[in-house]
């Protein structure tokens, strides 16, 4: 099972890199990843944490893996918003723990928020797809024409709706981090020592400090017996 797990990590995220030795950088990455995990776990509708690791892969210095939904083609507004909160959890942790000057470039969630507004109709603008099909074309000329045809007022409304979504999500992420500092410190301490913390262990530690939303609870995996 470990070999299968490692193979999936390698295919999805890239080759395993050299583990960091710099204390400050390693601590920052640990808080960043645990921030993702805590904010995701405490926001109703988010996918469950599979593991948090400080083992670098590809361009990532650390990774938080989540278990995908049973049906990835049917995703609710609550689930999408929860993913934005979870995605901003790393940045929120960096800001709360280390201060705004230490915030890194790890959080990139604007694209998902814009999809909620323009493609899925999940904003106060209305339940419509606001993007002309040509705006999603692979042809550069068609995309430019589509952008030019969009009214300036609508473009401003879209930008404002995206900002409201991300601002709201970030406030929730900051609240999760500020209200669960003790749990975060404990998990980070264990992560720095072990370099990888599994989802069951993560949830067990977190639940000692705060109640996990009912819809986000996951029964601990029970090892199955093997007959030889």
Image (cartoon, rainbow, N blue to C red):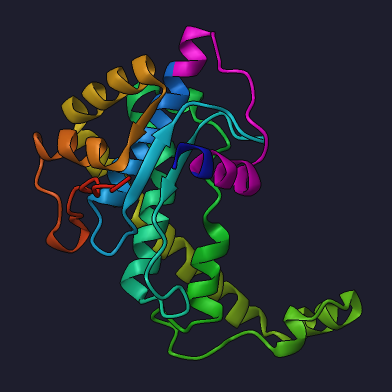
Q: Where does residue 152 sit, x and y in percent of width and height?
A: 66, 79
Q: Which residues are magenta?
A: 5-26
The quarter holding residue 33 reads top left
Does 117 lie within the magenta span?
Answer: no
Q: Is residue 182 left or right of residue 18?
A: left
Residue at the spot 79% in from the left edge and 81% down from the top edge:
137
Residue nearest the observer in this picture, 88 or 167 = 88
Percent coordinates x, y for residue 160 in the rendering: 49, 68
- Left or right: 222 with respect to 104? left
**Vertical side of 46 occupied by 10: above or below:** above
Extreme residue toward the right, this view: 141
Return the x and y of residue 142 as percentages of the image width and height: 86, 83
Q: Residue at x 41, y 76 (%)?
A: 71
Quadrant of the drawing holding the C terminus: top left
User: From what the image shows, is residue 66 above or below residue 134?
Assistant: above
Above or below, 55 relative to 23: below
Q: Residue at x 24, y 45 (%)?
A: 223
- Counting every numbered tag in the picture gives 0
């Amino acid at each position: 099972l470990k070999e299968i797990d490692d193979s999936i990590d390698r295919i999805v995220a890239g080759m395993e890199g050299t583990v960091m030795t710099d204390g400050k950088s390693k601590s920052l990455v640990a808080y960043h990843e645990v921030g993702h995990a805590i904010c995701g776990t405490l926001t109703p509708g988010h996918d469950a944490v599979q593991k948090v690791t400080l083992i670098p892969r590809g361009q990532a210095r650390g990774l938080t893996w989540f278990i995908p939904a049973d049906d990835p083609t049917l995703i609710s507004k609550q689930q999408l918003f929860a993913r934005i909160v979870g995605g901003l959890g790393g940045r929120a942790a960096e800001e709360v723990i280390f201060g705004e000057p230490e915030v890194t470039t790890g959080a990139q969630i604007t694209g998902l928020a814009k999809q909620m507004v323009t493609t899925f109709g999940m904003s106060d603008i209305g339940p419509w797809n606001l993007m002309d099909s040509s705006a999603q074309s692979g042809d550069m000329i068609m995309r430019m024409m589509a952008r030019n045809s969009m009214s300036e007022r609508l473009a401003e409304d879209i930008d404002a709706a995206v900002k409201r979504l991300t601002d709201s999500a970030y406030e929730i992420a900051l609240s999760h981090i500020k209200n669960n500092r003790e749990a975060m410190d404990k998990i980070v301490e264990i992560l720095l020592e072990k370099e990888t913390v599994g989802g069951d262990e993560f949830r067990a530690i977190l639940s000692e400090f705060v109640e996990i939303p009912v819809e986000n609870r996951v029964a601990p995996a029970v090892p199955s017996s093997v007959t030889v």
